[in-house]
Image (cartoon, rainbow, N blue to C red):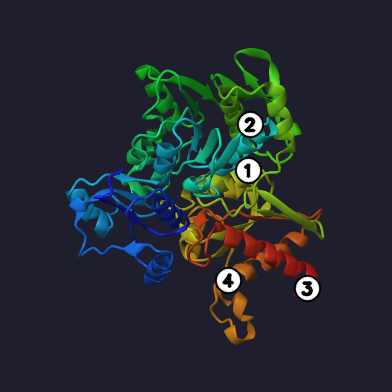
């Protein structure tokens, strides 16, 4: 340890603060920064000294631990990072810190545009069921450095995080899928794919690269890795596509076994095409980790699923409510609406690039009515009009007397009204209906997070039941 130099931790969210305290406990000379003054003051109360852009000698900084949410390339680097790059200061993330500290453990990384959290938790659940020493976290749950001692780390890895792992080696790396997302941050789809592909960068012939080849981008990545020949490449598919693991007649198969490994119908919390992809990908990953079929199958049967991911909330007056607040892009929403016939769909928030243009045909064929709210409401309304779909309603807070609304509900009142109208419409349908929250948008225009959005959805359902 070189105490003559300092470590800078930039960004003091949950992970950043954990990183700073972790490094301080290791005896490092730690300096911190966050753009929010109140956060810096809270850090100072915990004995952490702040740096400033004006007064930092970057020659005196050995490396930076960067919060993954802070840009260091596109759309433009944070001012501190721009200064540090001029001095070639190395930049890492919290997973790199964990790897440096626990490099003798096995690291299982999961990435992809959609399905990461469910698959990460499914892997974690199954390994615990098998009696394996394992912790899970990173982009899901606890920050990496807070995971404690164990023999195996199952880590959900976002594209942002994968830009910050220069030496981390994943013994097993799982790639689920790719669709256009986070392009403002990465620049274009190719840079987004390249960031994701860092999960394979440090692997060798002892390691596994497991790639679901359901989309064209992912298939090309698998072909490239096979041609390079660095690691063991295993392909999976949620269809009967030619792959090492695949789905046929609603069962999971491997080319190494003529009998089905498991039946998707047995896994009540893994329904839908997206979860078929998650399940077959997880099965291949668990095989690579040495688990047997019977253990995997029993664990999948007992898996309870994750909140806010096509979560069945309840049934009331023949109306079923499903919370898929985690559907923050069009592809996720498409996978949700495919599972229901003539649903009442809540869409809105901060639109991703491309909006809902790519799923208009599915909306027209699968959705009885769309309820638009939030920042994207007018954009989405125009997209639907242009496609000749008119079964939608727009909700905003215009002409609402806020003094008549409980203060806690004012910020979300258009969302709440959309939910209540969706319920009324679904309850008038013969045989009942489905109210589906699958917004195709980020949540930060009205909510703290997608979890907050899902919780407000469920709280509103409770209000409907009690007549509030």
In front: mark 1 or mark 4?
4
Q: Earlier along the polypeptide chain: callout 2 or callout 4?
A: 2
Can residue 431 be seen from the camera position used here? yes
Q: Which SS class for mark 1? A: loop
In front: mark 3 or mark 1?
3
- The image shows residue 231, relative to residue 94, as above or below, that is above
State the image quarter where residue 166 is shown: top left
Q: Which SS class for mark 2? A: loop
Mark 1 and mark 2 residues within 8 Å of each other at the beta carbon: no
Q: Which SS class for mark 3? A: loop
User: In the image shown, does 77 or 330 lie closer to the viewer?
Assistant: 77
Q: Which mark is residue 149?
A: none
- Residue designated by label 4: 412
State the image quarter where residue 127 is shown: top right
Q: Residue at x 40, y 43 (%)?
A: 97
Q: Earlier along the polypeptide chain: callout 3 or callout 1?
A: 1
Q: Earlier along the polypeptide chain: callout 4 or callout 3?
A: 4
Alpha carbon separation for disc pair 1 and 4: 27 Å
User: In the image shown, does 380 or 3 lie closer to the viewer?
Assistant: 3
Mark 3 and mark 2 residues within 8 Å of each other at the beta carbon: no
Alpha carbon separation for disc pair 3 and 1: 31 Å
Q: Which mark is residue 338?
A: 1
Alpha carbon separation for disc pair 2 and 4: 43 Å
- The image shows residue 85, relative to residue 223, as above or below, that is below
- Residue designated by label 2: 132
Q: Position of residue 173 (x, y in %)?
A: 48, 30
- Residue designated by label 3: 467
Q: Quadrant of the C terminus?
A: bottom right
In front: mark 3 or mark 2?
2
């Amino acid at each position: 340890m070189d105490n003559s130099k300092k470590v800078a931790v930039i960004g003091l969210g949950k992970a950043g603060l954990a990183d700073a305290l972790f490094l301080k406990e290791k005896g490092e000379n730690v300096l911190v920064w966050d753009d929010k003054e109140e956060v810096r003051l809270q850090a100072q109360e915990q004995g952490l000294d702040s740096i400033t852009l004006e007064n930092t000698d970057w020659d005196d900084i050995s490396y930076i631990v960067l919060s993954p949410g802070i840009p260091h390339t596109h759309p433009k680097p944070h001012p501190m990072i721009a200064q540090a790059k001029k001095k070639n200061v190395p930049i890492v993330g919290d997973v790199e810190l964990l790897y440096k500290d626990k490099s003798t453990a096995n690291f299982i990384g999961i990435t992809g545009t959609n399905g990461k959290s469910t698959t990460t938790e499914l892997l974690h659940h199954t390994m615990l069921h098998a009696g394996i020493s394992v912790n899970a976290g990173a982009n899901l749950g606890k920050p990496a450095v807070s995971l404690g001692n164990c023999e195996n780390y199952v880590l959900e890895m976002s594209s942002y995080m994968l830009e910050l792992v220069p030496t981390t080696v994943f013994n097993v790396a799982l790639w689920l899928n790719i669709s256009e997302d986070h392009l403002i941050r990465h620049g274009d789809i190719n840079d987004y794919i390249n960031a994701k592909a860092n999960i394979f960068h440090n692997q060798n012939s002892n390691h596994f690269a497991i790639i679901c080849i359901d989309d064209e981008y992912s298939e090309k990545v698998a072909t490239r890795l096979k041609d390079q020949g660095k690691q063991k490449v295993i392909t999976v598919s949620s269809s009967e596509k030619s792959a090492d693991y695949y789905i046929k007649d609603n069962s999971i198969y491997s080319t190494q076994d003529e009998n089905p490994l498991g039946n998707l119908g047995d896994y009540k919390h893994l329904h839908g095409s997206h979860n078929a992809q998650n399940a077959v990908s997880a099965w291949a990953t668990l095989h690579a980790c040495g688990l047997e079929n019977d253990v995997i199958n029993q664990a999948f049967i007992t898996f309870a699923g994750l909140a806010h991911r096509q979560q069945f909330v309840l049934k009331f007056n023949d109306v079923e409510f499903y919370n898929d607040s985690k559907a923050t892009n069009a592809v996720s929403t498409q996978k949700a609406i495919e599972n229901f016939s003539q649903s009442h769909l809540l869409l809105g928030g901060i639109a991703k690039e491309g909006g809902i243009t790519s799923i208009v045909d599915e909306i027209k064929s699968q959705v009885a009515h769309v309820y638009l709210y939030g920042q994207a409401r007018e954009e989405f309304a125009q997209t639907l009009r242009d496609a000749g779909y008119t079964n939608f309603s727009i909700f905003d807070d215009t002409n609402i007397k806020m003094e008549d609304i409980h203060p806690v509900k004012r910020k979300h009142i258009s969302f709440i009204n959309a939910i209540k109208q969706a319920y009324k419409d679904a309850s008038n349908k013969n045989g009942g209906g489905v109210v589906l929250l699958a917004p195709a948008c980020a949540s930060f225009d009205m909510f703290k997070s997608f979890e907050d959005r899902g919780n407000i959805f469920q709280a509103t359902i409770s209000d409907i039941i009690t007549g509030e």
